Amino acid sequence: MDLFGIQKMNISAGSGRTMRVFIVHAHPEPNSFNGGLTRAAQGALSAAGHEVVISDLYAMGFNPVSDRRNFTTVGDANYYRQQAEEANAAAQGGFAPDIQAEMDKLFWCDVLILQFPLWWFGLPAILKGWVDRVFASGGRIYGGGKWYDRGVFAGKRAMCSVTIGGPPPIYSSRGLNGPIDAILFPINHGMLYFVGFTVIEPFLVHAPARISDGERQMWLDRYRERVLSLVHAPTITYPKLADFDDNHVLKLA
Amino acid sequence: MDLFGIQKMNISAGSGRTMRVFIVHAHPEPNSFNGGLTRAAQGALSAAGHEVVISDLYAMGFNPVSDRRNFTTVGDANYYRQQAEEANAAAQGGFAPDIQAEMDKLFWCDVLILQFPLWWFGLPAILKGWVDRVFASGGRIYGGGKWYDRGVFAGKRAMCSVTIGGPPPIYSSRGLNGPIDAILFPINHGMLYFVGFTVIEPFLVHAPARISDGERQMWLDRYRERVLSLVHAPTITYPKLADFDDNHVLKLA
C-alpha cells in the first residue's frame, strides 16, 4: 500500500536552502486524483532538492479515535480528561508512538500540507482524528499562551490541498453549499492558525472526476508550481493576539 | 460500557403523540458532562412517554474510517469510488450491518440529536466518521435531487448539543476563535440541512469543567426543558432550493 515510496525522515539532514515539506494525505483510493496530487508534489519537490515526508493515513491504518490509546501514561485512571492526560503525557514523554511520530514530523517540517477530499464540508474522519490526537495541549502543540501568532509552529507555513465534488458556483459567496472560505474556516483558522502556522491560500480542484484528462493534467501542473513556490504563495491574513482585548474580543479600531 | 442502558429500538412501536428521539453521542468519558446531558435527555424524554435510542459511539467501538468496509457489496474491485460504491450498495442492499443499523435509526426517528464536545472547531473524528459513512449517496440518504429542503429527512428535526471549552466572548462575532454560528455552519447547514433536516438552534454549554456544580445542574435542567420542547424549539432559517438559480447561486431579490 506504500504508493508514495515514503522515505525515512532524516531529522538531522537538510541545508538552509532546502525546504522540508510534510504532507498528510487522506484518501482511501491510492489511484485517486488526491493520490495524483500528492505524487505530483512529491516528484516536483524531490526533483528540486527539497525533502518530503508523507503520512498516508489510509495506508498507515491510522487510528483516528482519540482516547487513552493516545498515551503510554495514565494521569487519572478513573476519569478521562483528555487535556489533562495530554498535559501529563507532555510532561512525562508519554505520547503513544503513533502520535509521537506525527509530532516529530510536525516539528521537522517547514511546510505542512493537508491533502484531502472535502467530505461533508470538512476533513475526512481519518484526518480529523489525526488533528484530534496529534494536536495535543499541555504546551506540546498548544497551550500555556502558545496559540495563534504566538503558537508553537509560528514561522512555519501550512496549506490545505482539497478536491471538491461540486463546481465553483455552488461554493461561491451566494452559493447553495456556502462560500468555500467559510467552509474551510474551522480548518484554516481553527486548526492550522490556532497552532501557529501561517496559512497559505488553499489549493482547490473542483469536480476532478468530471473534467477532462487535459484539465486534470493542467491542475497537476498548477499544483507542481504551487508546491515549488510554497515560501512565496499568498497567505490568509488573520488578526493577531495583540488585536484582541482581555476577553479575546477584537478591539475596535 | 453501556452507561445509558440502551433500549432495543422497536421500529413498529409508538403512537402519533410520542416523539422518537435518536441521540448520537460522542465522548470517550462516560461520566463526562456530555454523558450527563445525554442521561438527562434520556430520563426526561422517557418519563414523558417518548422513545429514545442512543448510539454511544465510543461504547459501541464505532469505526469512523470510511472505506470498503462500509459495504458488503463491491461495485469496482480495482478502483474505489466511494459515491459509486454507495449507489451500488443502495441498489443492492449492500451496506455493512453497522452502517445499515445507523441508517435504520435515522429513518425511525422524528428528531436527531448530535451530542459532542467541540474538538478542533468541529465534530470529534468518531462522529465525523459516523456522518462520512452513514450519510450515503445514491438516493439512500441523499442524491438524485434529494437534498436540502427536498432532502430525504425533510419533515424531521435535528439539533447539535455541544460542550465548548472556552467562554462565550471568544466565540462571539468579534471573538478570537470566530463566531460559534460560523464554526457550526458546516455541521448545521452542510450535514444536517443537506440531508433535509430542519435544524434546531444548537444547545451550547460553555466551559462545563470550569463552572460550579450549581451551574452544571442549571444547564442539565435547561437541557431537559429543551429536549421536551424539541417540536417547538427555534430553528435556523436557511434559503430553500427554489431560491437558487440553475447554477445553485442565490437569486437576487
Image (spheres, coloured by chain):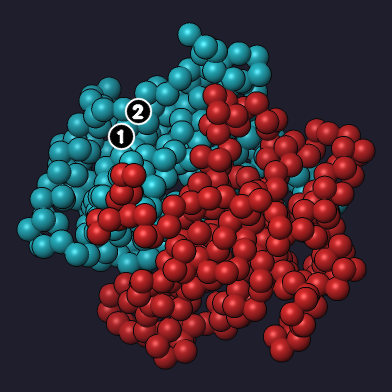
Chain colours: A cyan, B red
Q: Up-down: is B174 above or below B232?
A: above
Locate the N terminus of chain A and report the quarter of the image it occupies.
bottom left
On the question of residue A22 being in view, the answer is no
Out of B187 and A163, give the one closest to the viewer. Answer: B187
Determine which of the numbered discs, if any, sits on residue B157 in the image: none
Q: Up-down: is B190 above or below A244?
A: below
Q: CA distance from mark 2 to mark 1?
A: 6 Å
Q: Is residue A184 left or right of residue B180?
A: left
Q: Do callouts 2 and 1 mark residues in contact (Cβ within 8 Å)?
A: yes
What residue would you read off at disc 2? A236
Q: Is residue B27 left or right of residue A113?
A: right
Out of A3 and B40, give the one closest to the viewer. Answer: B40
Residue occupying image coordinates x 22% and y 65%: A209
Q: Up-down: is A157 above or below A173?
A: above
Count of number-bearing discs: 2
Secondary element under disc 1, as helix, strand or loop, is loop
Q: Earlier in the sequence, mark 2 or mark 1?
A: 1
> Which residue appears farthest toward the right when viewing the image?
B214
Q: Quadrant of residue A124?
A: bottom left
Q: Chain of mark 2?
A: A
The percent position of residue B206, horizontal first and vertical second, equals: 72, 37
Instruction: Identify which amino acid the numbered label 1 is placed on.
Output: Glu
Q: Is residue B74 left or right of residue A225?
A: right
What residue would you read off at disc 1? A201
The percent position of residue A133, horizontal first and vertical second, equals: 58, 47
Secondary element under disc 2, as helix, strand or loop, is loop
On the question of residue B130 being in view, the answer is yes
Out of A57 and A220, give the one closest to the viewer. Answer: A220
The percent position of residue B129, horizontal first and vertical second, equals: 53, 62
Instruction: Identify which amino acid the numbered label 2 is placed on.
Output: Ile
The percent position of residue A38, horizontal first and vertical second, equals: 26, 51
> Which residue appears farthest toward the left when viewing the image?
A214
